[in-house]
Amino acid sequence: MDQNEIGKQIEELRKKKGLTQKELAEKLGLSNTAISKWECGYNLPDISMLIPLSEVLEVDIMDLINPQKKDAPKLSTSPTKANNHPKKILIIINILVFIFIISLLATIIQNNIEAKNNEETISNSEVKVYEITSKDPSFYINGYLIFNNNDNCFILNKIKYQDPSIGTDNPILAKEVTIFVEIDSQIVYTFNTSQRRKKSSNLNDLFDEIITNLSIPNKYESNFSKYANKLDNCELRIKYKGDDEENNEINIKLVAKEQFT
């Protein structure tokens, strides 16, 4: 098949139908550029486009891919024209073989994609659990980080401040508190008090309020798998305001100890 001849044939048939390149492209769901490339002989129509193209132009598929026969009578009893039938059959067979090969390749690719997806599903089912504690002796923290490739959960069971220098509570007063969980300097969770208090209260009381009312915290990152090797850089950042309305911040280094996988 000669691309230039097929291109000229498409152009001629299009013009006979009174269609512009744009109108033909719209009927086929293609761009003007695709039609132009066909007619200039740069590209051939995709196999999947032969049937819709022949329907739009109202011609036989063979009139598209074998333009040399366009001037031949539809029926002929002469030996010379009869000899064209084996060529026509051979072209059709070649097209069918080509379509079969494409279908076979598509099936193989689809099977490989499904197999890969199954492998990923198995990998995504792996669950990791880490116990979270504090490196700072001034804070007692107990929590758990649970995640796989699809989802994650940070459970904060207890957080309490105590000044170790005197062995008793040395209250920090605050009206509102927000707790950020950061891994590798990226915020992955936030917890906060439900409402601002008129007067400052013990910071530990606000911690208890957060844990008591805890449902689902604001989550910034849904895929924790990339943090699997970065949990050594895990931190709790506490921001609070007291009666003086000043913004205060406490940073606490955390320890993430793997419990089981």
Image (cartoon, rainbow, N blue to C red):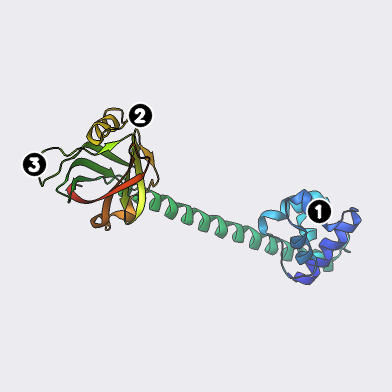
The answer to whether residue 163 is seen in the rendering is: yes
Q: Amino acid at mark 1?
A: Leu
In percent of width and height, residue 156 lies at 25, 38
**Sequence-earlier tag: 1 or 3:** 1
Q: Which residue is mark 3?
A: 167
The quarter of the image holding the N terminus is bottom right
Q: Which residue is mark 1?
A: 24
**Crowd class of label 2 (few under 14; some 14 to 19; many from 20; radius 10 Å):** some
Q: Amino acid at mark 3?
A: Gly
Image-based side of 257 in relation to 120, left or right: left
Tell me the residue at 86%/58% (across/down): 13
Element at badge 2?
loop
**Front-lying residue, 82 or 141:** 141
Tell me the residue at 15%/41% (across/down): 162
Q: Which residue is mark 2?
A: 197
Contact between marks 2 and 1 (CB within 8 A): the answer is: no
In percent of width and height, residue 154 lies at 28, 41
**Front-lying residue, 148 or 181:** 181
Which marked residue is nearer to the observer: mark 1 or mark 3? Answer: 3
User: How far is mark 1 from mark 3, CA to CA?
Assistant: 85 Å
User: How far is mark 2 from mark 1, CA to CA?
Assistant: 69 Å
**Front-lying residue, 11 or 87:** 11
User: How far is mark 3 from mark 2, CA to CA?
Assistant: 28 Å
**Sequence-earlier tag: 3 or 2:** 3
